[in-house]
Amino acid sequence: MEAIAAQPFLVAGPAGNGRTRRHVPDFLLVDRSGLVTVVNVKPADRLADPRVAQSLGWASTVFAARGWRHEVWSQAPPVVLANVRFLAAYRHAARVASETVAWVDGATGAPVSIGELEGAWPDQAAGVRSAALHLLWRGVLSADLSRPLSASTVLERAA
């Protein structure tokens, strides 16, 4: 992934009954080739609701008209969802020291745990963790998100 944005925009358009339909997708993903995928996350039991199905169908049509893919995700493993929600707090570059981000970026040529990175710069351990999680959110680094994030989480360069 080249970029990920949470709740990236508001789409508004005619609902066909004189009203305006509004929709905020959950994620916008852009891969390295520039392909855009818009993701809506809904619990599986909500997908059978006709209003939800109609809303997602409308959104899919709007996104397809722009040449974007549309996916509906449900039933994701709870640990993966918790990790993604947690990582979203590290999406803003302005909240992470750029010099620490550069240091972590340079220090992750080979697979390394978050704890090892923190141990390499103990005076800045909290900043190092924030920078590592920021780079993970941005897709510069990758990790196994099926396990809870911790100091033992191994980071490596994203493919």
Image (tube, rainbow, N blue to C red):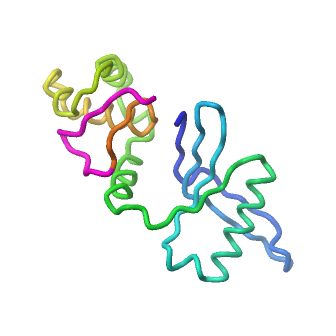
Which part of the image, by quadrant, shows the C terminus? Answer: top left
Q: Is residue 146 left or right of residue 57?
A: left
Q: Is residue 57 above or below residue 96?
A: below
Q: Is residue 135 above or below residue 67?
A: above
Q: Quadrant of residue 123?
A: top left
Q: Is residue 134 above or below residue 97?
A: below
Question: Which residue corresponds to the image point at 50% horizontal and 74% vertical from the top-left?
Answer: 44
Q: Is residue 5 left or right of residue 53?
A: left
Question: Which residue corresponds to the image point at 42% horizontal and 30% vertical from the top-left?
Answer: 158
Residue 3, image x and y in percent? 54, 37
The magenta stretch spans residue 151: yes
Q: Nearer the viewer, residue 14 or 109?
A: 109
Q: Main SS type for the magenta part?
A: loop
Q: Nearer the viewer, residue 23 or 56?
A: 56
Question: Which residue corresponds to the image point at 35% horizontal and 25% vertical from the top-left?
Answer: 101
Q: Quadrant of residue 150?
A: top left
Residue 156, image x and y in percent? 33, 29
Q: Nearer the viewer, residue 94 or 14?
A: 14
Q: How many marks?
A: 0
Q: Quadrant of residue 46?
A: bottom right
Residue 65, image x and y in percent? 81, 52
The magenta stretch spans residue 149: yes
Question: Which residue corresponds to the image point at 77% horizontal and 46% vertical from the top-left?
Answer: 67
Residue 100, image x and y in percent? 31, 23
Residue stretch rendered in magenta on the structure:
146-159
